[in-house]
Amino acid sequence: MRSYTLIAPAKINLHLEIIGDRPDGYHELVMILQSIDLADEIYLQASDTDTIHVRCNHPEVPVDKSNIAYKAAALMATEFPTAYGKYGGVNITINKRIPVAAGLAGGSTNAAAVLVGIDLLWKLGLTQSELEELGAQLGSDVPFCIAGGTAIATGRGEQLSPLPSLDNIYIVLAKYRSLAISTPWAYKTYREQFGDTYLRDTDSLSARAAAIHSGPIVQAILHKDATEIAQKLHNDLERVVLPAYPQVLQLRETYASTGVLGTMMSGSGPSVFAICESQQQAEQVKLRIRETIPDEDLELFVTRMISHGIQVASSV
Ligand code: C5P
């Protein structure tokens, strides 16, 4: 096979809790990550040269070495020099549908697709955990994006514990096109404002991370009950993002007024999602939001939770 087309789904956070600092400057997190049906398409093609080349249909996505998909291919070339020598470089084409800088892991899922695709292109036969270890070198959300579905993520976000999958729960997702929030800014501001509440010792951190397994959101997921899940949504980063970005707060409030089951910002924002009773309700909510906020800058999607991460769509 000389080319692969891969589907790279976005994620939302059903739970995001910041529990402490890490010696590497990151935060200790307890999260529940959920794949959704909104996805980018990644086309990987073996190149006749030894270069890595990125193309993307979205004008705001860089196509140079700073693109995380480029970094993923470069990491594979460094880790597997013999295969790189044998098979050559790779052309990466990203068909972007996931809003960028939105808290939806759009870049991370592209990197995950490149790791999975090059593993196939170069016939490496890597295991899921080997791919996840490579992913962790690229970004905290990359390991989750590989297998996707529903999972508890702890540590930096790279330590995964899968949960039973949630299929066919419909959500509406909203994001202002021109609004981008820097993830480092969100975490830094949180540390400045709430750092004094962080747990300091290893035992307390481990106990807090372990507590999620028997916590109410996991119980709701085990019951596969959309209403219960929607009532237990949590995101600590809302404490810094909502006061600083009135548009995000307005979205949260507008959703709540439409009678959705529950609503929350995803990751470091600014995208906000709402859990709905059905696809029909999700379509109605989308229309209501559009009527209430008739701003063309606001992108709205009806999508649903899915049970998988990167998938191969075709190979030639
Ligand atoms: O790992 P990733 O590159 O996605 O993280 C982006 C930024 O988010 C980091 O540079 C850091 O500022 C913040 N972050 C953090 N703690 C984490 C994950 C991310 O502070 N566990």
Image: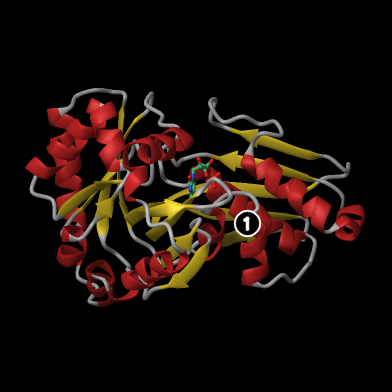
Q: Looking at the image, is 43 positioned above or below residue 148?
A: above
Q: How many marks?
A: 1
- Left or right of residue 98: residue 246: left
Q: Quadrant of residue 6?
A: bottom right
Residue 214 spot, x, y in % from top left: 29, 76
Q: Is residue 159 left or right of residue 126?
A: left
Q: Is residue 292 above or below residue 223?
A: above
Q: Position of residue 50 (x, y in %)?
A: 88, 43
Residue at screen point 59% across, 61% down: 312
* In the depicted structure, whether residue 184 falls above or below residue 158: above
Q: Is residue 273 visible?
A: yes
Q: Nearer the viewer, residue 265 or 273?
A: 265
| Residue 10 visible in rendering | no
Dot 1 falls on a residue whose secondary structure is helix
- Residue that appears at 79% across and 67% down: 123
Of 124 and 31, which appears nearest the observer?
Answer: 31
Quarter of the figure that contains the C terminus: bottom right
Residue 257 falls in which quadrant of the image? top left
Q: Residues within 10 Å of mark 1 (few under 14, many from 20)?
A: many
Give the residue at mark 1. 135
In this rendered view, identify the residue nearer to me: 151 or 40. Answer: 151
Name the residue: 29% across, 64% down: 168
> The N terminus lies in which quarter of the figure?
bottom right
Q: Residue at x 27, y 76 (%)?
A: 222
Whether label 1 lies within 8 Å of ligand 1 gets the answer no
Horizontal relation, residue 238 to residue 189: left or right: left
Q: How is the image coloured?
A: secondary structure
| Left or right relative to 233: residue 138 | right
Going by the numbered disc 1, the residue's amino acid type is Gly
Residue 95: x %, y % from top left: 55, 40
